[in-house]
Image: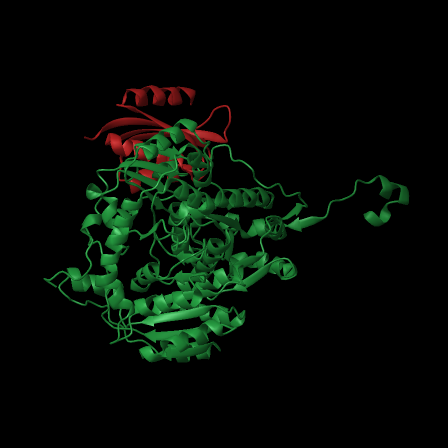
Amino acid sequence: MKQDFTLEIASDNNFSILNRIVNVLNRRRVRIKKLIAHENEDDFRKGGAVLLLHTTPDLMEKVKHQLEKLIEVEYAKYTNGSEQYLELSEKIVDID
Amino acid sequence: MDALLTKSEEKITPATKQKITGSEALLRCLVEEKVQHIFGYPGGAIMPIYDALYSYADKLTHLLVRHEQGAIHAAQGYARVSGKTGVVFATSGPGATNLVTGLADALIDSTPVVCITGQVFAHLLGTDAFQEIDVINTTLPVTKWNIQVTEAKDIAPAIAKAFYIAASGRPGPVLVDITKNAQNELIEEFEYQPCKAVRTYKPKPGLQSEQIIEAATLINNAKRPYILAGQGILLSGATKELIAFSEKTGIPVASTLLGLGAFPTNHPNYVGYLGMHGNYGPNINTNQCDVLIAVGMRFDDRVTGNVSKYANQARVIHIEIDKAEINKIIKAEVAVHADAKEALTELVKHCKPNRFTEWINSFKALNQEEFEKVVEKEIKNTNSLKMAEVVHMLSELTNGEAVVVTDVGQHQMVTSRYYKYKNPRTNITSGGAGTMGFALPAAMGAKVASPNQQVIAIIGDGGYQMTIQELGTIMQYKIPVKILVLNNNFLGMVRQWQQLFHGKRYSFTEMDNPDFVKIAEAYKIQADKVTEQVNLESALKRMLESPSSYFLEVVVEKEDNVFPMVPAGAGVAEIILEIPKAN
């Protein structure tokens, strides 16, 4: 059964990283409901993204490992539902 | 100004460091990485690098291919046979996009390759300049990593990182796109720092002892354990460890397509080749084993057939360096996220000595059934020339010790079945991507990497014509590779599927071919053609004995089929030995 997941990704911040992340999700046909990408305030060489995804638990787990396989991704972690997305995205917007 | 300085002033002036171009910096990086051979093709946006290369002929040997696809397949063959990273040069735009098939092939088959592409000047990026293509985004899904470099100072760190990433962990292709201004720009001489770590990248997982203990417990209690050996064994150099593990535990070993050579085919515990056209025993018994030990393999659909019917009775141990492969297709009860060599070295210590004679005999009985119904008819056929008898004879004549490079299709499956590989890194083929046109350039690269080994490309008439232009490279550099074309005037595997699953509607698979012998001779390559069985052995011997490059065309039966076969959508245990009656 498909459901919402909040995915948090920490990565290096370079020109292609967002494309790489989205490519993995597109290839698996995972629906992206919302997305915020950001660079870290204290170190512009690092960044990340927070995504609200709609997919199955099985595919979410598989996609997490495929994302972590990307060279620039430090970690990818997810939680069920959209609450965490709202919290994390508010934090990012506050920083900006 | 300098002329105006006094002697004393000259003494106190700090010594000026010699400046070099970005292009020369790149070449120095390659020398530092102990690169010996480069396969490439020049063009406008990479000309500064080629200009610098002119002065590096004593340190770097460049082979001018006839198409960039030839360059990357050659680099793949080079890497697969030697374990070293293959290196490719190509220009921007179409030069770079011609690499895409090879990059995809290298990615899925875990082959370490570093491609350097020239790019337009940085200020022209995104302007649709001549031969400007967004190479980074084009190659992003088919590379392990890629990077664009727009300043000369960034070339050395990018190259160091590229070589590290390409060869570490699960190997793969890396592309470094260098703008022309970065190639021309002058920088102060540098000291090359090889890359030893990348902050966000953990190529080699630490071995978890609890995973090993769990795996050993399952193995020690198993009644019908079964090892599936994949290319991970070859990549981690774990052949010795696999043999030791199998010999101590008595567990039978089957091989995937890319795993062929990882375990000697003449070993008593070897039970055959897995997959769609694999042996009968290994496929049937996949659904009979109680513990399945998959080492360095990724449960490709050509191995599993219909996943819902795959080894449902078995408790699965999956030893794999790439975490994303674990539980991707087949759920593992015990996942050992580790390098195959390290895992087997540790695992063998915790496993009890054992013997499974009856279990191994069950494979042999099934394989005997296959021998009687399929193999015997193929290799002892007296009516017409069959692919199987050609490969079987070649295997006998070379004692299973040649490096055999195959393309994609029927001849590839026949070679996997009938060539009896004895040594690691002697089976070079396009597995995951199934790239027709792979074999000729890959064989060329393999021979450059390993000049003392007999290297034979076995190719179908379709795939041969996809990269036939590389005969020019073979001619120019006198690369003594042997080319064996099995010609059935058909795209044979597609035709076989059309026969079996599309009511014999041979839609665009029959080919009118040119005179292959004349083509080879036009490239100054000695050539021969066999049309009758009686001439086969002597022709093969002449080819093998030739000290130079050699082309041999064998005209084989037109509508020959490869069996056994797991039909599309069927489970591995539903493997068939012959054409179903309805056909």
Q: Is residue B467 visible?
A: no
**Residue lying furthest left:** B582
Residue B7 at what x, y percent from top left?
90, 45
Residue in front for this viewpoint, B512 or B226 = B226
Horizontally, residue B125 falls left or right of residue B359, namely right
Q: Quadrant of residue B470?
A: bottom left
Seen in the picture, residue B20 relative to B503 is either above or below; the reply is above
Residue for point 47% across, 66% down:
B66
Q: Quick one: which chain is red?
A: A
Q: Pick the residue in front: B300 or A88.
A: B300
Q: Quadrant of residue B483?
A: bottom left
Residue at 41%, 73% in the rendered image? B540
Q: Is residue A48 left or right of residue B49?
A: left
Task: From the viewer's side, name the closer residue of A38 and B470.
Answer: B470
Task: From this view, report whether residue B80 is shown above or below residue B383.
Answer: above
Q: Position of residue A56 (x, y in %)?
A: 23, 32
Does the rendering let one see residue B152? yes
Q: Classify the position of the C terminus of chain B by image quarter.
A: bottom left
Q: Nearer the viewer, residue A25 or B275?
A: B275
